[in-house]
């Protein structure tokens, strides 16, 4: 009989206890009462729920208490009950878990530095996006958005090597997408891929002045004229490669120089698309293809375990930390299976006592699993 560590324990060991405790100290959060669920025993069930796709506190409690000693062998030192988790979700400060995620993200990105990048570019390619997470207005009035709807907004900057979150934040749903660009740390040489909701030429100029590049979908209401055109291969989906100059009211003040405009025809959806960029050296086909690498991966959150702002934030930060721990595990063990498939396989073997490397020893990595259950999905909380 194998008496080693469970798969879950091996993954969570990638988050050192000293780093977890340091996050609490850095945020100035006092230790809970001695009779309460410890912070680590609060964090672990939410991490386990993320890995195994549990959908309620009752579900978590039933699974962890199904066998005597199961929770103990998974690293828990307190009895996990629905009431204890509910109280902790309502009362515990979420900031230490946010701080922990902020420490893990650069570590994971450093590990994935040598991963194949989009179109073999030697610089980071970062997809910037935001998602509205719908909540029940009756249960979550604190998240009032329109007077009848409740929601929060999740902002992500995703490094497409992996994919690994480079930046992550949670705001009220009314917070503008473009305003988030002010908080985004710009990496010189990186490509930032965005939809038209992020068009603000003053903020885009900040990206360019930092030595980075953007590829952003054009907006029809922005006026410009074509200053020059370059020949493109129209046997492909490319239709134009132009130099444009803005001639609207305020835009030229914030972007007085030229922009590059690349257009293409999307045969799959029968539509024409155009993108603006401040990158002039890269082939037009690569500029167009970069936008189609704008993907969402990683977290899978179908339902929230609490209805307060605190509970929602705790669950989101715990899910992100768990995803990062799985990404660290894959890289540290030298497993070549893609990260998407790696996450799916671990979800089926959480309580198995087998070294993770053995689990993937004879794995066929030629094709990812067809299921999309690990993609970033948010369903209404009803």
Image (cartoon, rainbow, N blue to C red):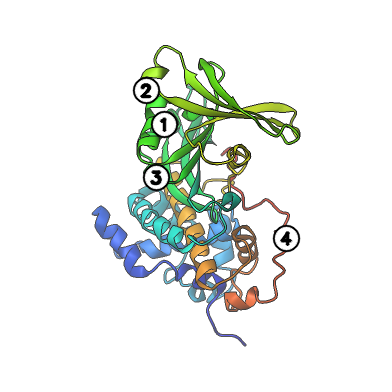
* Residue for point 48% across, 75% down: 72
Q: SS of the residue at dot 1?
A: helix
Residue placed under numbered mark 4 in the picture:
367
Q: Measure how far apart labels 3 and 4 are at the Cα level.
A: 39 Å
Badge 2 density bin: few <14, some 14–19, many ≥20, Cα 10 Å: some
Residue 305 x/y as whole percent:
51, 48
Residue 201 x/y as whole percent:
41, 25
Residue placed under numbered mark 1 in the picture:
204
Check whether the beta carbons of the residues at disc 3 and disc 4 lie within 8 A of each other. no
Q: Measure how far apart labels 2 and 3 are at the Cα level.
A: 39 Å
* Residue for point 62% across, 61% down: 338
Badge 1 density bin: few <14, some 14–19, many ≥20, Cα 10 Å: many
Is 264 positioned to the left or the right of 253 in the image?
right
Q: Which circle's residue, 2 or 3, is located before the other in the chain?
A: 2
Residue placed under numbered mark 2 in the picture:
254
Q: Which circle's residue, 4 or 1, is located before the other in the chain?
A: 1
Residue 206 x/y as whole percent:
36, 34
Q: Measure how far apart labels 3 and 1 are at the Cα level.
A: 33 Å
Check whether the beta carbons of the residues at disc 4 and disc 2 lie within 8 A of each other. no
Q: SS of the residue at dot 4?
A: loop
**Which is more toward the observer, 82 or 357?**
357
């Amino acid at each position: 009989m194998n008496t080693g560590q469970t798969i879950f324990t091996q993954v969570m060991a990638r988050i050192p206890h000293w780093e977890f405790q340091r996050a609490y100290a850095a945020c100035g959060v006092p230790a809970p009462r001695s009779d309460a669920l410890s912070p680590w025993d609060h964090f672990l069930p939410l991490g386990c729920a993320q890995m195994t796709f549990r959908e309620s506190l009752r579900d978590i409690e039933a699974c962890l208490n199904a066998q005597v000693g199961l929770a103990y062998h998974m690293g828990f030192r307190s009895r996990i009950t629905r009431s204890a988790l509910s109280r902790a979700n309502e009362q515990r400060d979420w900031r230490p878990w946010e701080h922990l995620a902020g420490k893990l993200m650069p570590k994971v990105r450093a590990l994935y530095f040598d991963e194949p990048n989009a179109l073999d570019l030697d610089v980071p390619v970062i997809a910037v996006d935001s998602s509205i997470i719908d909540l029940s207005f009756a249960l979550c009035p604190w998240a009032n958005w329109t007077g009848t709807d409740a929601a929060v907004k999740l902002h992500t900057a995703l490094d497409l090597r992996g994919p690994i979150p480079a930046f992550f934040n949670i705001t009220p749903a009314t917070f503008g997408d473009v305003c988030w660009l002010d908080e985004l740390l710009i990496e010189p040489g990186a490509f930032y891929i965005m939809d038209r909701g992020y068009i603000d030429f003053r903020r885009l100029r900040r990206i360019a002045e930092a030595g980075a590049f953007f590829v952003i979908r054009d907006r029809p209401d922005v006026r410009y004229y074509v200053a020059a055109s370059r020949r493109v291969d129209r046997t492909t989906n490319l239709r134009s490669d132009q130099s444009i100059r803005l001639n609207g009211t305020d835009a030229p003040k914030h972007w007085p120089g030229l922009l590059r405009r690349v257009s293409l025809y999307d045969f799959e959806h029968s539509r024409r698309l155009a993108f603006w960029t401040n990158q002039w050296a890269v082939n037009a086909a690569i500029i167009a293809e970069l936008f189609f690498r704008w993907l969402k991966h990683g977290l899978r959150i179908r339902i929230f375990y609490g209805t307060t702002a605190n509970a929602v934030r705790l669950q989101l930060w715990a899910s992100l930390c768990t995803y990062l721990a799985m990404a660290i595990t894959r890289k540290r063990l030298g497993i070549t299976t893609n990260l998407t498939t790696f996450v799916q396989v671990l979800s089926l073997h959480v309580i198995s006592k087998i070294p993770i490397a053995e689990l993937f020893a004879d794995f066929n990595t030629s094709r990812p699993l067809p299921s999309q259950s690990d993609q970033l999905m948010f369903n209404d909380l009803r």
